[in-house]
Image: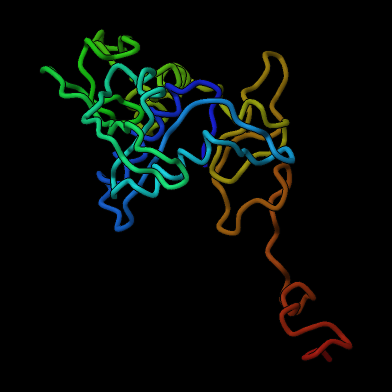
Amino acid sequence: MMVAVEPTPLLATLLEATRAVRVARLPVPVRCGASTGEVILLEGDDYIGNTVNLAARLCDLADGGQILASLAIVEHLPRWATVLSVEDMVVRGIGEAVPVARVGFATLEPPVRPDPICGIPLSRDVAEEQLHDAYGNEVWLCSDSCRDTWEHRPRPIAEGQGSLRTRSSAPDQAAAMPAGRFSPGRPGPPATPGIAPAVRPGPVPRGGWHRADKPRRPPRPGSRSQNSHRGRPGSPGGR
């Protein structure tokens, strides 16, 4: 069960959910029923009342991929949705037949473009928001939520930035390292005028640096470091 303060975002969510399931070709179809009116909040996390009961009964009557709604809520459909049909239905728990609307996507005049966020097909006349991308092209959005997501989307990285052939726009990480310590294969920090650097870049030994200011010395024959793989005294495998 979904509850909303405003009916338009709720209907848009139902339409988007049914479309997403159909496009993904999922084996489980979605059936929806929608109604509007006063409800009772029960124990802080549940809603009861005639409005909730009517929406639940309409959901039971709907076929897979259908959205059945009361006539009171279809007045708040998004601009890109429409009423496909209206018929009287006998709803369990209600003494007489009630008019029920089947809602869906409106037939659009070309050109038609998908919303870049949710993929809902839109034309310029029914788009809720119209923006422009970095190339000056119009972007049609179906709701304020998609517009907010579009405006706060991650910006693409410039082509080639950070590659081996171009210089990254970010500050050199080596300059932020303390003097005298750097990773193997990375040059040390730039020298300050009048002050000799603590480490001068040079060829990295095969074993790598042990300390930035002191190269690692090869172990002497018979030393403890050379025979450490044999175990320590008192340990399994040791003497």
Q: Quadrant of residue 164?
A: top left
46 on left or right of 100: right
Q: In the rendered view, would you say 209 is above or below 38?
A: below
Residue closest to the far left: 110
Residue at position x 38%, y 35% from top? 14
Q: Position of residue 115 (x, y in %)?
A: 29, 24
* Residue 133 placement: quadrant: top left
Q: Quadrant of residue 201?
A: top right
| Residue at the (69%, 27%) spot, across then down | 197
Q: Nearer the viewer, residue 186 or 158?
A: 158
Query: 26 and 76: which one is in front?
Result: 76
Indicate whether 188 appears above or below 79: below
- Across and down, in percent, residue 55 comes to 45, 38
Counting from the top left corner in percent of width and height, residue 7 is at 46, 23
**Side of 82 where 95 appears, left or right:** right
Between 100 and 180, the residue placed more toward the observer is: 100
Q: Residue at x 32, y 33 (%)?
A: 100
Instruction: Using the image as rendered, state which of residue 106 and residue 70 is in the foreground.
Output: 70
Residue at 27% across, 20% down: 80
Describe residue 180's horizontal placement relative to residue 99 as left or right. Answer: right
Q: Quadrant of the C terminus?
A: bottom right
In this view, 206 is above or below 81: below
Q: State the image coordinates of residue 166 (x, y, percent, origin top left).
A: 37, 26
